[in-house]
């Protein structure tokens, strides 16, 4: 059944501020909101304020609300006046993202179905779905990324797009499970008819109590695992911060590599994710963004608390 969209469109008097350019969309960009407002409140605030920031849809646990016409651009991806994200993509905000919980989970599920519907209507494939981070490096959709579930969300969209079966991942998805909040290895084993020891063997898990949200669990011996054991990303002790001259060396590379594994290091297209061993403003900013979504003081300084939190999420 088609998802109905409620409209609360910005007035034409504000087009120059919110959506000044005609647009023929080529992509859909997914965001997580920075608060716990409903879709109605998100749209009302967006179309009513004096900021240029804008987006096309807000999705909560009950409804989808549209705030901008789809033939107008939105300022939502931070890649500049003529950036492809800002000028060629439809912005979809998932509500209740700050605190998460059941309302967020329902909002994300509705957003997945809605994005699949948008793709179907346009004859597009999953390659047209982007995250905010793809356009300018911002850590968004922050909740999905912090839980390590971006590929899982894309796979869910693709599954709906293809009538319940992901064409590209149908064979592997039955052999892989992504850990959700509250999961235990014993529970995963029981629900898929395998033993805990079998899952430990397939996934090289020494302690069955140490599984992470977003971790990929092989359910058979043939699927490839992408789970990141902390030992795969050794982190240095001590404190590292921006200094003059800049701090350089192997320890900095270890921090940058771990940030890249957690999707915080911004240079996705660069060789080795831009890992250069230099603790400059770029690395400090990545640390700040990690700290911000992890409940730490966002000072850009790598220290014991940041190390512990990164090891917890890896």
Image: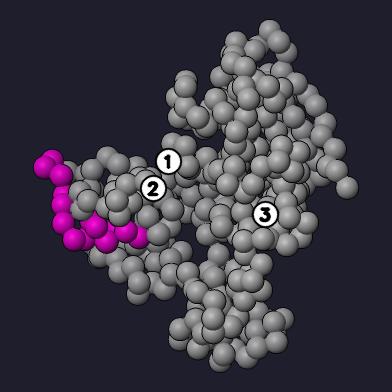
Q: Dot 3: few (<14), some (14–19), or many (≥20) neighbours within 10 Å?
A: many
Q: Which residue is mark 2?
A: 268
Between residue 175 and residue 63, name the one nearer to us: 175
Q: Which residue lies at the image location 60% right of the left edge and 33% below the top edge? A: 26
Q: Which residue lies at the image location 18% right of the left edge and 61% below the top edge? A: 250
Q: Which residue is mark 1?
A: 137
Residue 76: image x %, image y %? 55, 30
* Rendered view: 88 above or below 238: above
Residue 44: image x %, image y %? 72, 25
Q: Which residue lies at the image location 37% right of the left edge and 55% below the top edge? A: 260
Between residue 308 and residue 64, name the one nearer to us: 64
* Rendered view: 178 above or below 286: below
Residue 222: image x %, image y %? 54, 81
The answer to the question of whether label 3 and label 2 lie on touching residues, with beta carbons closer than 8 A, is: no
Q: Secondary structure at mark 3?
A: helix
In three-dimensional space, the C-alpha distance between marks 3 and 2, rounded to whole angstroms, equals 23 Å
The magenta segment is: 244-258
Q: Which residue is mark 3?
A: 158
């Amino acid at each position: 059944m088609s998802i109905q969209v409620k409209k609360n469109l910005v007035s034409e008097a504000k087009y120059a501020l919110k959506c000044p350019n005609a647009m023929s969309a080529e992509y859909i960009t997914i965001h997580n909101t920075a608060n716990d407002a409903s879709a109605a409140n998100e749209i009302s605030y967006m179309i009513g304020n004096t900021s240029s920031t804008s987006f096309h849809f807000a999705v909560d646990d009950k409804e989808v609300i549209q705030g901008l016409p789809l033939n107008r651009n939105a300022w939502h991806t931070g890649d500049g006046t003529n950036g492809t994200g800002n000028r060629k993509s439809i912005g979809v905000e998932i509500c209740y993202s700050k605190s998460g919980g059941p309302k967020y989970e329902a909002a994300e599920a509705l957003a997945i179905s809605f994005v699949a519907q948008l793709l179907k209507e346009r004859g597009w494939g999953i390659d047209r779905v982007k995250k905010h981070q793809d356009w300018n490096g911002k850590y968004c959709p922050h909740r999905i990324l912090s839980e390590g579930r971006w590929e899982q969300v894309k796979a869910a969209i693709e599954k709906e797009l293809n009538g319940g079966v992901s064409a590209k991942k149908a064979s592997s998805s039955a052999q892989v499970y992504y850990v959700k909040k509250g999961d235990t290895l014993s529970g995963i084993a029981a629900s898929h008819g395998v033993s805990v020891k079998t899952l430990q063997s397939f996934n090289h898990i020494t302690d069955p109590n140490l599984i992470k949200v977003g971790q990929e669990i092989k359910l058979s011996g043939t699927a490839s695992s992408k789970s990141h054991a902390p030992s795969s990303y050794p982190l240095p002790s001590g404190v590292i911060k921006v200094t003059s001259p800049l701090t350089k060396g192997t320890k900095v590379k270890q921090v940058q590599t771990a940030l890249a594994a957690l999707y915080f290091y911004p240079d996705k297209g660069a060789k080795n994710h831009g890992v250069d061993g230099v603790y400059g403003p770029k690395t400090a900013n990545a640390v700040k963004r990690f700290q911000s979504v992890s409940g730490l003081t966002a000072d850009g300084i790598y220290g014991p608390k940041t190390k512990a939190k990164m090891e917890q999420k890896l």
